[in-house]
Image (cartoon, grey):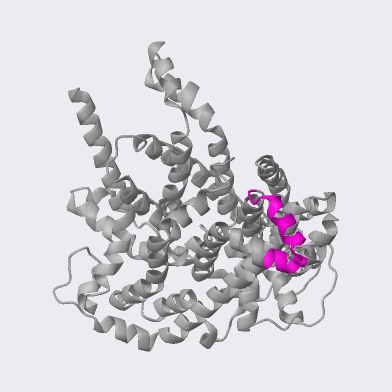
């Protein structure tokens, strides 16, 4: 009996150690974002003596963060909506009308989960479509990159929506597109929310697409702005920390609000298998 | 009838976007791999296998980049799987505040890789970083290293940072797998006098195999595509010691040597598509089974 209690305590202690190891780096940044320059130089865990909120105002002005924040929000929202629209309708048709061709096309799209992107030749495509260095270009690319995994998740879910509903809709005189929009799409809400949150976070965290295809600083999203800021203010870790906090905060807030959806979404397709 | 209800032209938009921006560049890549496409001249000439000769020549570092990518992939697959499984086994039962720990352990996987890189640039700083400071504080100052600057440590540090970020995610997948294993197996084994090791070897691991396969695949795809963590932490340095495929491609791109960059990219594409084919076929089939 005693051994069991001890084992329990050890297990719980270990859980706490792990949680702390995962959290300390984030806490370190938060703590140092409130210090003055000299205090943050050591980048230690000691608490700031006074809270320097001014770091945040400096960062927002110097790093042109308002602009980048708006950009990020725009890219993220637009690409998430576009990505879901493209993925859900295709997944729906593939799942409902499983002809040989459609099964192949479904496979062709989800192959994108494994295939890497050729960023060099993608430049040529971006030039030819006149999307290089444009906001629309980044939105399209972010949406396209999200398609394979979104189609995979939504396809699995469409199977659980009973076909009888489609037939009832047709009886009532629904055209195919209305059938999808007003009957099927509302029933896909759970998976659409999951996919939406995942794509939103993926787009917010993306760094590589703007690095390749946006030269214009006024169009930069938060990630690129924070990296550039780090290059200019390396010695001012208090400012860099404040910038990092502002970049990360939106994802953390979304994560804490939607953690059930996020964890289940990111682990689905793996546990089921 | 079905085609009328579920017209295939609904999928055309998706297919066009996906083909143009995802597939087409990769296919074009094979053509441009055999050209001298660069940023200095507008003319593109066919040069046969020259780019590939450059990639595999002994005077260049490209083979090293491929080796680094493979090293990174294998190391992170092993580390994340072994640690993730060990953590999942330790936390499988008798934990209070499960929800809280789950949120904490999963947290690093949702933070942007770029931010993780910047955080660890500070933590791994030889002079002022939290890691070396902590080592000195507990009297293990001798273990302090120049983590990201020393050739012997830089790549290991990058692997460790990536493991820190990804292990919680893997652990949670495996934990979900563990909890679906019925306790009756363990009870039956206990009656037969099986040791903890035997239970692990003959019950847990075999029944967890599907989940282990999936985590391995995820980690492998992630590892082969690694870019940001290297770009931010060392940008390939010191020298070329930590360059991987995607950082090398980006460098070629920045220098305007598009032909070589494309050739490198096409090699990666070929490899991952062949490997991916088998994996994705498995995923597609399992998805179909459920319906």
* Vertical position of residue B166 compared to residue B5: above or below: above
Can you tell which quarter of the image residue B259 is in? bottom right
Between A76 and B131, the residue placed more toward the observer is A76
Q: Is residue A166 magenta?
A: yes
- Residue A74 in percent (x, y) is at 53, 80
Residue A85 makes an appearance in the image: yes
> Mostly what secondary structure, the magenta segment?
helix
The residue that appears at 72% across and 57% down in the rendered structure is A168
Which quarter of the rendered picture does the N terminus of chain A lie within?
top left
Q: Residue furthest top?
A: B192
Residue B193 makes an appearance in the image: no
- Residue B199 in percent (x, y) is at 43, 21
Residue numbers of the magenta segment: A160-181
* Vertical position of residue B31 compared to residue B99: above or below: below
* Vertical position of residue B270 compared to residue B288: above or below: below
* Vertical position of residue B253 compared to residue A220: above or below: above
- Residue B52 in percent (x, y) is at 75, 59
The residue that appears at 45% across and 34% down in the rendered structure is B178
Can you tell which quarter of the image residue A149 is in? bottom right
The residue that appears at 60% across and 51% down in the rendered structure is B221
Can you tell which quarter of the image residue B175 is in? top left
């Amino acid at each position: 009996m005693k051994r069991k209690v001890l084992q329990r305590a050890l297990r719980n202690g270990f859980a706490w150690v792990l949680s702390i190891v995962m959290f300390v780096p984030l806490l370190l940044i938060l703590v140092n974002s409130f210090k003055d320059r000299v205090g943050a130089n050591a980048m230690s865990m000691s608490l700031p003596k006074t809270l320097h909120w001014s770091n945040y105002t400096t960062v927002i002005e110097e790093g042109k963060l308002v602009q980048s924040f708006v950009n990020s929000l725009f890219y993220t929202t637009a690409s998430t909506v576009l990505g879901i629209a493209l993925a859900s309708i295709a997944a729906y048709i593939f799942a409902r009308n499983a002809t040989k061709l459609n099964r192949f096309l479904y496979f062709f799209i989800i192959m994108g989960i494994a295939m890497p992107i050729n960023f060099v030749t993608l430049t040529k495509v971006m030039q030819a479509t006149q999307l290089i260095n444009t906001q629309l270009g980044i939105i399209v690319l972010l949406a396209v990159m999200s398609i394979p995994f979104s189609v995979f998740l939504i396809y699995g879910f469409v199977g659980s929506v009973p076909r009888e509903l489609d037939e009832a809709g047709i009886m009532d005189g629904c055209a195919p597109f209305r059938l999808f929009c007003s009957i099927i799409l509302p029933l896909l809400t759970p998976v659409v929310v999951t996919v939406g949150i995942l794509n939103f976070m993926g787009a917010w965290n993306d760094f590589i697409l703007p690095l390749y295809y946006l030269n214009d600083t006024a169009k930069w999203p938060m990630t690129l702005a924070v990296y550039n800021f780090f290059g200019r203010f390396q010695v001012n870790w208090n400012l860099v920390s404040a910038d990092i906090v502002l970049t990360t905060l939106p994802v953390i807030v979304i994560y804490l609000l939607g953690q059930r959806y996020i964890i289940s979404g990111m682990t689905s397709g793996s546990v089921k298998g | 009838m079905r085609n009328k209800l579920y017209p295939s032209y609904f999928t055309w938009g998706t297919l066009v976007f996906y083909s143009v921006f995802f597939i087409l560049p990769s296919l074009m890549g094979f053509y441009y791999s055999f050209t001298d496409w660069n940023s200095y001249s507008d003319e593109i000439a066919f040069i046969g296998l020259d780019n590939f000769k450059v990639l595999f020549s002994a005077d260049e570092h490209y083979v090293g980049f491929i080796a680094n990518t493979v090293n990174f992939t294998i190391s992170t697959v092993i580390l994340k799987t072994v640690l993730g499984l060990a953590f999942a086994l330790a936390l499988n039962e008798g934990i209070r505040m499960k929800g809280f720990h789950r949120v904490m352990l999963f947290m690093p996987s949702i933070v942007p890789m770029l931010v993780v890189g910047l955080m660890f640039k500070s933590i791994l700083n030889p002079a002022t970083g939290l890691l070396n400071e902590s080592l000195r504080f507990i009297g293990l100052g001798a273990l302090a290293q120049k983590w990201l600057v020393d050739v012997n440590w830089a790549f290991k540090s990058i692997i460790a940072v990536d493991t820190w970020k990804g292990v919680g995610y893997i652990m949670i997948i495996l934990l979900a797998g563990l909890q679906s294993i019925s306790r009756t197996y363990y009870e039956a084994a206990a009656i037969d006098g099986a040791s903890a090791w035997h239970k692990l070897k003959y019950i847990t691991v075999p029944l967890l195999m599907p989940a282990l396969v999936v985590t391995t695949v995820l980690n492998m795809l992630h590892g082969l595509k690694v870019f940001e963590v290297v770009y931010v932490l060392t940008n390939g340095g010191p020298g070329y010691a930590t360059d991987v495929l995607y950082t090398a491609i980006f460098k070629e791109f920045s220098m305007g040597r598009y032909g070589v960059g494309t050739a490198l990219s096409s090699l990666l594409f070929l490899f991952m598509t062949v490997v991916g084919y088998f994996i994705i076929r498995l995923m597609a089939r399992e998805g179909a089974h459920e319906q």
